[in-house]
Image (cartoon, rainbow, N blue to C red):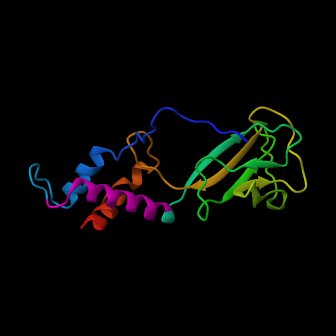
Amino acid sequence: DSYLVCPDTLAVTAATPTATITRVRRTLKDTASTNPNIADAEVTQAIDAAVKTFSRDRRSVTVASYSADGTSTDYRLPPRWVHGYSSILEIEHPAGEQVRTLLDDADYEVVESALGGIPRRLIHFPYLTPASGTDNMLVRYTALHEHTDERDTIPRGDFDAFVWLAASFAA
C-alpha cells in the first residue's frame, strides 16, 4: 500500500458570482452597501440552496468520454456524478461514428463494490467488453447544476427564475 502526500494546502477557488448576489439583493430590495439586512454569507447560502432545488426540477445533462482498453468491463463513474441523484441517460459506443450506436440499458449497470474495504461505484458492462480506442465511449448522464464564477450551467432563459428562487430562500 502507498499513498501520496500533497505538500500544498488545497483550497476551493470557485465562488458565487458577485453579480448574482447583487441581483438577489436587488430582488429583495436590500441594496444598502453599508448595512444590508441580509449578510452576504446568507445570500450565498440561499443561492446554493437554489442551485440544489433548481437541479431537481431542471436536471443538468452532461457528457463524459472514456477511452476503453478492450479488456475492462468496469469503469469509474463520471467526475460530476452524485450518488442518489445522477443517472445514466445513454452510452454511445463506439463514439464518433456517422450513425450513432447507443447501447441498450441491459448492456450496462451502475454497481457498488468494495476495494480493500473502501466502497466504490462503477459502470459495469456484464455482457460486453468495450472495444479499445481513444475517447471511443460517451456517457450522457444527469448531474447537479453549478453556478460559480468558474462554471455556470444554469440556462440563460431560466436565470431570472433562478434569481427569484434564490431570493425566496434568502427572504
**Percent position (x, y) of residue 135?**
74, 35
**Percent position (x, y) of residue 71?**
89, 41
Residue 52 falls inside the magenta stretch: yes
**Percent position (x, y) of residue 69?**
84, 37
Horizontal side of 15 relative to 81 (left or right) equals left
Residue 115 position by quadrant:
bottom right
Q: Residue at x 31, y 55 (%)?
A: 44
Horizontal side of 118 relative to 74 (left or right) equals left
Residue 11 position by quadrant:
top left
- Residue 75 visible to the viewer: yes
- Image: 4 above or below 53: above
Q: Residue at x 42, y 42 (%)?
A: 12
Q: Residue at x 44, y 51 (%)?
A: 154
From this viewpoint, which residue is outermost toward the front?
1
Query: 48 and 10: which one is in front?
Result: 10
- Image: 156 above or below 68: below
Residue 18 position by quadrant:
top left
- Residue 111 visible to the viewer: no
Name the quadrant of the C terminus: bottom left
Q: Residue at x 69, y 40 (%)?
A: 65
**Percent position (x, y) of residue 87?**
65, 60
Q: What segment is highlighted magenta in the picture? A: 37-55
Q: Main secondary structure of the magenta part?
A: helix
- Image: 123 above or below 152: below
Residue 67 falls inside the magenta stretch: no
